[in-house]
Image (spheres, rainbow, N blue to C red):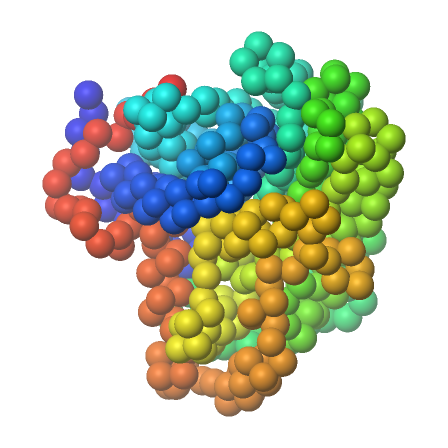
Amino acid sequence: MALQVVSPRIRGFIATNAHPDGCALNVRRQIEVARGLRGSTQRYRNVLVIGSSTGYGLASLLSAAFGLDANVLGVCFERESTEDRTGSAGWYNLAEAHRVAREESRLVRTINGDAFSHAVKQQAVDALRAEFGPLDLVVYSLAAPRRQDADSDTVWSSVLKPIGAPYTGKTIDLRNDAVVETTIEPATDDEIEATVKVMGGEDWAAWLHTLADAGLLAPGCRTVAYSYIGPEVTYPIYRSGTIGRAKEHLEASATALTAMLKDRCQGAAWVSINKAVVTQASAAIPAVALYMSIAFKLMKERGTHEGTIEQIVRLLREHLNLDVPLVDEEGRIRIDDWEMQPDLQAEIAAIWDTITTDTLTEVSDYAGYKRDFEQLFGFSVPGIDYAAPTEVHRLIQ
């Protein structure tokens, strides 16, 4: 037993601790949304989620397990608690997901380790052979800051930088809640290449080839990876920057993977373009917090705002439930469609041009953005007594 009062240690877009009860309640809320999928499809019996502990990956695991009644193996890299430090939010998320699954006699397992490595891929192969069987769906939702080459000591680190010219634009200084102007110098060729290595489609392809060679893809197996496009105001730092270059590589990888899967198991691969949501990864991107604060206010007023779990439920119900998913002219699934409506984007752009620190709380939902960010780590969750001691040592079992 290790009962502690856990107070938030958050500064800007960095959080160094997490509250286990808040994370658990967040997971239970998502599970209830996921249950709305029950009875919608029997297509997916065994599912692998790579990057399963937070954000869209966690939503995918919960939707598959509690919405589709599938057996789910997750792969992630999270931190267990120590004597002087809480576990990571992702650790507590999965501890609760496993607890509920165990209560309901569902098969949910987690491999905690470096998903880029050969060793973890082999652990997944062994686990699938022992408890699951061939896969009907593989979800790739890995968001990592760095990657070590599985065959050498080379380490690539991703960067958030523009390409070709410096970027100057508005952002929110999350340390003092101010709208400020920031300038970011362009990436070097080496930084662009490293970002593609970390966040592109190379590892996604490596996973699918490993699984295919192991005979672990069921007939008609599908795979989906997640991406984002976003609005023109964030293009220089995102879609036209280093991360965008990596996402282009990810999307191009779907074409090659579809050819391989068609040959091996009559399967296919897609990239799903998702809406902007508050995640640990997105919080670090300049301009995106400000954009999301404006977009969230307008989308909530329209009744079209969704979080990660609502997005993935819609992806599974309206797209991956079909024999042939609906795609755009580039072959991508689009569940950012409500966000990217032209009239909404025009309204966001008009507010973007005039927003200042003085008008931030009036014309945006910055308060909601901050609350969403704090809730990623189990804080500011209604119904939690944060003054009460709680058990911080929790197991994923």
Foreground residue among 134 and 74: 134
Q: Which residue is drawn at 62% across and 17% down?
A: 133
Taking the view exactly as shown, the residue that stands out farthest to the left is: 388
Q: Nearer the viewer, residue 296 or 133?
A: 133
Q: Nearer the viewer, residue 174 or 32?
A: 32
In the rendering, at what x and y percent does residue 263 appear?
Answer: 87, 30
Residue at the far top: name it. 130
Q: Does residue 298 lie above or below 97 as drawn?
A: below
- Can you say which quadrant of the picture contains the C terminus? top left
Residue nearer the viewer, 210 or 6: 210
Residue 194 in sight here: no
Residue drawn at the location 77% of the way across and 70% of the way down: 165
Question: Which image quarter: residue 87?
Answer: top left
Q: Relative to residue 391, is residue 258 depicted above or below?
A: below
Identified at 53% across, 54% down, the residue is 314
Q: Where is residue 158 in the image (x, y as percent from the top left)?
A: 67, 47
